[in-house]
Image: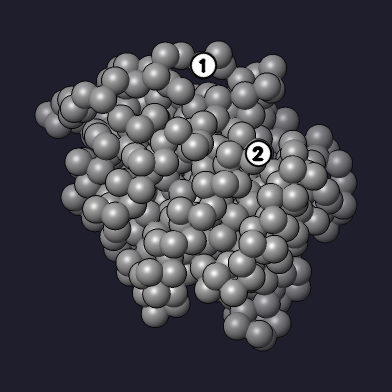
């Protein structure tokens, strides 16, 4: 309801800005009293080891550390858990430190495609350290990754190095049984064949920050993979059409914070209903968001834009995205839904494009889930 969404802004503005005690108080004392009736979210990808969440921008301290209040804003909009993305061995160790301090945080272990020079140089000892870290922290580490290919940023790591070290990391999935947290950027013609020939080596996974085509959706779903949607997935009118083709039982939500925010220039911005108090970094106010610094609380906006683009309600989308995420990353949790049959490798039927943007239509699903 609109009044409830407006209430989120009032709760965050009054409760979080007016008192610093919330950052130190138990979560139960900081969450809105109406949280049980709100949608529940899991942010599958947030880069919370980034120093901007400590007020540090490009080596310069711009404002006080507001990490605890950033988390409180996430809990206030209905966030249940957050996956802290790690892209190197040292980053995974820092992420695990955060996870030990905050019980609703979880993480990944793997090497990002743009950092594969580090794995290349470290060789088998580096790979072994990744495997040991994942095994020793089972329960906190819930996925292998972030791994994959990125042809947009070859200036960070050469194509042959990325290809070689993407395939090397499947041993981490084999050694842990964990699903994959995948990165695919302008590389589907190479990325998808690698997954196809290694499909027997991993249990499942999600392609996060998806910005591909309808054809890519069809092939990824045929492999039993999920698709993560954030602001970068919703940047163009074309992308708003592509996301209609994703089956409901394959969608997950993420922010990729502090990146991939939904901007006023994006076509989906018109669908945003929930606004959070925000200031420029130069005018930082404790308890408010920082303009241009995406954060997990903005997942509610991702949900609103995606839902309206698909002709669904945000509440319905949030519910099935939450179930999908629990099924893949937290399968033994009592709240996790039971797995269904594997999806058929059939072409996807598009959502009715004639449906009004704000109308609620039954969510389309694939033939099943893995």
Circle 1: element type? loop
In the rendered structure, find residue 161 and report the number of the disc placed on it. none
In percent of the image, x 87 and y 46: which residue is there? 25
> Residue 18 sits in which quadrant?
bottom right
Is 142 placed above or below 114 here?
Answer: above
In percent of the image, x 20 and y 41: which residue is there? 215
Residue 202 in the image, given as x and y percentages of width and height = 50, 36
Circle 2: element type? helix
Taking the image as shown, residue 36 lies to the left or right of residue 113, namely: right
- Label 1 vs label 2: CA separation? 20 Å
Q: Which residue is mark 2?
A: 176
Name the one closer to the observer, 20 or 340: 340
Q: Residues within 10 Å of mark 2 (few under 14, many from 20)?
A: some
Identify the residue at the far front of this view: 124
Q: Which residue is mark 1?
A: 339
Q: Residues within 10 Å of mark 1 (few under 14, many from 20)?
A: few
In percent of the image, x 60 and y 83: which residue is there? 58
Residue 204 in the image, given as x and y percentages of width and height = 48, 33
Give the image's coloring scheme. one colour
Residue 147 in the image, given as x and y percentages of width and height = 50, 55
Taking the image as shown, residue 161 lies to the left or right of residue 172, namely: left
């Amino acid at each position: 309801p609109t009044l409830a969404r407006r209430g989120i802004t009032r709760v965050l503005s009054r409760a979080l800005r007016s008192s610093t005690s919330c950052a130190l108080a138990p979560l139960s004392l900081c969450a809105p009293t109406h949280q049980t009736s709100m949608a529940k979210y899991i942010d599958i990808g947030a880069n919370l080891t980034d120093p901007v969440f400590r007020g540090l921008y490009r080596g310069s301290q711009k404002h006080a550390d507001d990490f605890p209040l950033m988390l409180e804003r996430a809990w206030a909009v209905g966030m249940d858990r957050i996956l802290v993305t790690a892209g190197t061995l040292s980053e995974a160790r820092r992420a695990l430190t955060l996870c030990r301090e905050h019980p609703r945080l979880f993480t990944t272990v793997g090497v990002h495609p743009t950092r594969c020079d580090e794995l290349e140089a470290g060789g088998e000892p580096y790979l072994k350290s990744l495997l040991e870290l994942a095994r020793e922290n089972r329960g906190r580490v819930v996925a292998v990754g972030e791994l994959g290919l990125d042809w947009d940023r070859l200036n960070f790591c050469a194509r042959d190095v990325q290809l070689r070290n993407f395939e090397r990391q499947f041993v981490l999935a084999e050694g842990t049984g964990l699903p994959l947290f995948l990165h695919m950027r302008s590389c589907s013609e190479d990325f998808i064949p690698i997954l196809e020939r290694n499909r027997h080596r991993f249990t499942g996974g999600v392609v996060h920050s998806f910005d591909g085509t309808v054809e890519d959706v069809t092939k990824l779903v045929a492999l039993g993979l999920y698709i993560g949607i954030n602001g970068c997935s919703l940047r163009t009118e074309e992308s708003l059409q592509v996301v209609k083709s994703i089956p409901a039982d394959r969608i997950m939500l993420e922010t990729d914070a502090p990146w991939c925010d939904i901007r006023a220039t994006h076509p989906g911005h018109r669908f945003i209903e929930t606004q959070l108090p925000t200031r420029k970094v130069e005018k930082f106010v404790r308890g408010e968001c920082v303009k241009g610094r995406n954060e997990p609380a903005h997942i509610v906006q991702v949900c609103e834009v995606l839902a309206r683009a698909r002709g669904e309600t945000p509440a319905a989308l949030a519910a099935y995205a939450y179930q999908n995420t629990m099924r893949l990353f937290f399968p033994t949790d009592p709240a996790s839904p039971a797995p269904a049959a594997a999806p058929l490798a059939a072409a996807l039927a598009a959502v009715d494009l004639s449906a009004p943007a704000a109308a609620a239509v039954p969510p389309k699903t694939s033939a099943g889930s893995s």
